[in-house]
Amino acid sequence: MRVVRPYGDTLDDGKVQLSFTLPVPDGAKGREAARKLVLSWGFKDCEVAHSHPLSADFSFYVAYGKTEVPIDYDSVVADEAESDGSMDMDGVNDFIREHIGRKVVIVGACTGFDAHTVGIDAIMNMKGYNHHFGLERYPMVEAYNLGAQVPNEKLIEFAGKVKADAILVSQVVTQKDVHLKNLAELVELLEARGERRNYVLVAGGPRIGNKLAVELGYDVGFGKGSYADHVASFVVRKMVERQRS
Amino acid sequence: MQNKLHLSTERVAYARRLAEKIAAPVARFIDGHSSVTVERATLRLAGADGANSDGVPVPNLVVDQVRAADPSYLEDGVLLRYVNALVKSGGTVAELNAKIAAGLDVTSFPLGDRAIVERKAAELVDRAAERIRDKRARREAMRSEWEGANNDPLLYLIVATGNIYEDVKQATAAAEQGADVIAVIRTTAQSLLDYVPYGATTEGFGGTYATQENFRIMRAALDEVAERQKRYILLTNYASGLCMPEIAAMGALERLDMMLNDSMYGILFRDINMYRTFVDQKFSRMINASAGIIINTGEDNYLTTSDAWEKAYTVLASQLLNERFGFQAGLPARLLGLGHAYEMDPSIKNGFLFELAQAQMAREIFPEHPLKYMPPTKFMSGDIFKGLAMNTMFNFVSKATGQGIHLLGMLTEAIHTPFMMDRFLAVDNAKYVMNNMAGFADDIEFKEGGIVMTRAREVLDRTIEFLEEVGELGLFDAIERGLFAEVKRPKDGGKGFEGLIKKGPAYWNPFEERLERELGISGAKGGN
């Protein structure tokens, strides 16, 4: 057991930095309301360091709180796809040559009405993102990026046409949980057609965690900070794992 | 602003000639064509409005009726049947709209005396022109009353709640915090709807529907804040997509001040058919020009899609093309808010100098244009503190190079739609930086042969090479082969191709004729 608390400038001081808006005018009363609010969240101590009016009826606060609540670090299980052990681009290509022996076909799209291709592009485009090349650059991967606003039906149809091994779905817009609906619908459609097991199914996006993706019926979910090599490593290992099972 | 980069004026003039050469054959195509949305925009200017009980807008109903009666009727222009129905039914435009919404088919009336139809249309054209002139005069009066009250560059903030009434609250707060421009971002995928929804809306994903009623509601709210703040608040919306001219028409009628409008964005980034987009953008820009609406072009998209350092030349190339297509549509330089963005990888050594070079180059090549400068988005992360630092650098470059329209970066760009406090922090940062270094631009010169001057020249040279290549292929083929934004678009592919209309010998559109006369540009009948 290893007990930890937030670290300000001394071990176990439990200092936390907060900023928030209240729908009240700025002033002494607003600041006191902010302080009491922070205390009510369980902080033992609170200093409102700064306040400023945002408009006649709204005000902004920067506050510091002190918490005594600890966590047992050893008991924590991370909700993230295991990206620590992922291979780099060359490693993935070697793995495919050795264990699969043909090009792996990967189809990706932003589904539903989502028009934000930034996520799928970061994973698939030749250029990649942040010095991690995209799947189009992988010699042993045949990558198809269908872009934005692709209906789930069309994605499935295309994946069938090119005999895809994996389907990547990116969802950026999460307002009113529209991403959940889109993601769940794809799984339902695949299952209805009896094709779910044909694909390694991958969900991705800034608000998508592995846990959420798995709950929705995906093999894995990738959130912030994921790159093409993480996705590719998972896909090829999963394919091999399925061949063996 | 003085010329500091000492770019060769001959090279810049040559780049402009290349853009002109590239745009000329496109213009000939455009002038021979209309589209369903050009026709609907024309109907809207004539007064067609409202929707039936299924929510199908009256302009769509009319175009669909004409097409259903005989597809070749479209070649004559749809206005003919609408005005004929107006004359034959003997009531007002509003009465006719109500009847159409209730099921009346405009093609059920046989075509009557052409002279009477033309007289009636002339009335409608005058009425629309007068309304647009009045809106423009009102804007000019308010801007001159509060002259000097706006920030320089104009500080531009976005609201995007999905509910127009909630947008009003956010926009009001943003304006009170110091924003000069409010943009109401549209709901995801509106750009792919081949109609404009009707009425006030309270549901949207990632944004709010652009409707004429929503425009009116936000306009009224911003005018109220402006009165209190003694500062004109500009309203922006998005004309990109399948309804460019209709949204331009609505914006003209409701006094929007700026409109996102790019000659190629829809083709490259929304997979809309290229012929359709070129036809649509021209008519939409003619309406913008007549209404005094500043367009904002979308060059930032090239940089979020590709690498901003490597592909910097695609921005200048696109700016030159957007300028040329703008001139073809009668937009003067002062209404051409050409876009660019601060999107280089922040880990690049001297990246700040390269951004400075690009922004200064745009300023010098487009001296009278109110350049629209977009903040870092691609490399923004959950590290909001780093994000705030990046926005600070962006604010600095904008002021140091005299940009016109400054879209404020949000420190939470990569996390969520902005909190009210995120917008405040953005305005506060910009005001601090821009006041703190207000005289920097006048005081500073660049070193001959230094990083900034060398970079600007390299980008100009590369742009010229690129435009030469596009010029040899022709623009349609260049897009088809993927020269722009690394995306290939087939000529007859993409959305909306079926909505393209070849103008027949009897094509009649008195609104278009009026705009061409007013703007001093030539169209199909003006003789090219």
Image (cartoon, coloured by chain):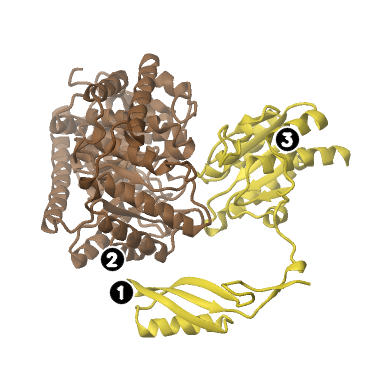
Chain colours: A yellow, B brown
How many numbered marks, from 0 up? Answer: 3
Using the numbered discs, state the Cα–Cα distance from disc 3 to disc 2 in whole angstroms.
54 Å
Give the foreground label among 3 and 2: 3
Q: Which mark is residue B524?
A: none
Report x, y in % for residue B277.
37, 31
Q: Secondary structure at mark 1?
A: loop
Using the numbered discs, state the Cα–Cα distance from disc 1 to disc 2 in whole angstroms.
8 Å
Do marks 1 and 3 share a subunit?
A: yes
Q: Residue pushed farthest top?
A: B472
**Residue behind mark 3:** A92
The one nearer the camera, B175 or B410, is B410
Q: Residue pushed farthest right?
A: A245
Q: Residue at x 33, y 37 (%)?
A: B357
In this view, B126 is above or below B463: below
Q: Amino acid at mark 2?
A: Glu
Do marks 3 and 2 share a subunit?
A: no
The one nearer the camera, B226 or B202, is B226
